[in-house]
Image (tube, rainbow, N blue to C red):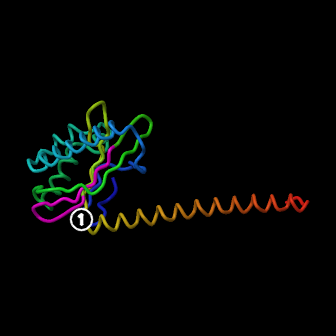
Amino acid sequence: MPAMKGSRSLPLQMGLALGVAVALGGCGLSKSTEKAEAAVNEFHQRWNGGQFREVFDSAHMDFRRAKPVEAVAQQMEALKGNYGTFQSATKRSWGFNSNDGNTDVRLTYDTSFEHGNAVEEFVYRMTGDRALLLSYDIARPEVAAQREEEQKARREAERNAKESERKAARDAKDAERKAKRDGKSP
């Protein structure tokens, strides 16, 4: 697991790349979102109760494989020491990723804690009719804003690179067509 980014961020699982929300059946998405939101509520109840082993035990097996229960419980206890008890949350964004038959629901919240505010990101893997925690990240708002800017810049760079490739391909085809029209080979 990488070191904490920023002063208070702790990703509990690496390597999960979520894509842009995909178009799935509306009813299924709604149900998945409701189940994931209910799981976030349960997570916050366990957070306030210091029930971090229960968070671990009810998480997806990929989450549980990432680190031993003792390490996760210690890290979450330390985070709770920094942030304090959960008070309220407002959904900031949500998205879905469906890959290899798995559907993951990503929920991001602006959250108020006893000792300040944070941005939380939860990823739940839909397993049957259950939402199982796949990853959890918490960061101070300024760290989350910096990450968002970095992601936005990466996406923009990727778009620009793809557009440059498309333009180069168009230019090459145009040159080939022009050469054919002029009776010359490229």
The question of residue 116 being in magenta is answered with yes
Which x, y percent locates residue 185? 88, 58
Quadrant of the drawing holding the C terminus:
bottom right
Residue type indicated by callout 1: Arg
Furthest residue in direction top, as rendered:
128
Q: Main secondary structure of the magenta part?
A: strand
Above or below residue 104? Residue 151 is: below
Mark 1 crowd level (few <14, some 14–19, many ≥20, 10 Å Cα): some
Which x, y percent locates residue 45? 11, 46
Kindly identify which residue carries mark 1: 140
Residue drawn at the location 24% of the way across and 39% of the way down? 35
Which x, y percent locates residue 18? 40, 49
SS at badge 1: loop
Residue 91, picture quadrant: bottom left
Residue drawn at the location 42% of the way across and 50% of the way down? 19
The residue closer to the viewer here, 68 or 59, is: 59
Residue drawn at the location 11% of the way across and 64% of the way down? 115
The answer to whether 85 appears left or right of 19 in the picture is left
The answer to whether 147 appears left or right of 69 in the picture is right
Q: Which residues are magenta?
A: 105-119
Residue 32, picture quadrant: top left
Which x, y percent locates residue 184? 90, 61
The answer to whether 128 appears left or right of 160 in the picture is left
